[in-house]
Amino acid sequence: HLRLHNWDANAVKYYDESVIYILAAKFVFCNIALIEAMERGVAPIVSKVDKADWVITDGVNGLMYDNTKEGLAEKINYLIEHRQERMRLGKAARQTIIEKFNNDSRMNVIEEEIRALGNKVSETKMAISA
């Protein structure tokens, strides 16, 4: 069954009681709640939006849905009816977080973002001076 809770500083207890995590959002990249749920092995269902594929590979470590209530309902029902798949996705989600969000990986991402930002600043300066 579905339970909605108010904000709680100790969200881990809710993840540990959950088997599906739903993120209906317009922007997914590095969503902390999503990362926390995945780290606890909860199978995620995420909106198909820009940057969602940076964290979720559809059918590999979670499911993505078109931003419709029908699309979301289809994915929820699928995971409810397919326990083994739900468990597999949860394990893969956890492994993704272990691999992508360890300290070394996070530093690589930060360095890449800083380099990209530096390139954009350089390009902008060159365009302005031209």
Image (cartoon, rainbow, N blue to C red):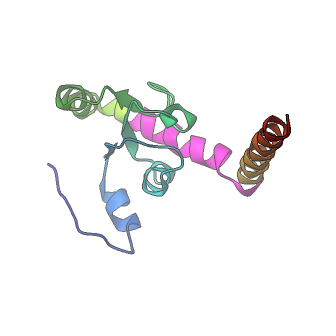
Q: Nearer the viewer, residue 35 or 12?
A: 35
Residue in the image at 51% along x and 28% along y: 57
Residue in the image at 85% along x and 40% along y: 129
Residue in the image at 51% along x and 52% along y: 39
Q: Position of residue 66 (x, y in %)?
A: 31, 25
Work out whether 88 lies above or below 42: above
Q: Nearer the viewer, residue 127 or 27?
A: 127
Work out whether 36 lies above or below 21: below
Residue reaching furthest to the left: 1
Q: Which of 28 and 116 is in front in this view?
A: 116
Residue range of the region highlighted in magenta in the rendering = 87-104
Work out whether 85 lies above or below 96: above
SS assignment for the magenta stretch, majority: helix
Q: Where is residue 19 in the image (x, y as percent from the top left)?
A: 32, 46
Is 54 within the magenta?
Answer: no
Residue in the image at 54% along x and 49% along y: 30
Work out whether 46 lies above or below 111: above
Q: Which of 57 and 28 is in front in this view?
A: 28
In terms of image quadrants, where is residue 65? Answer: top left
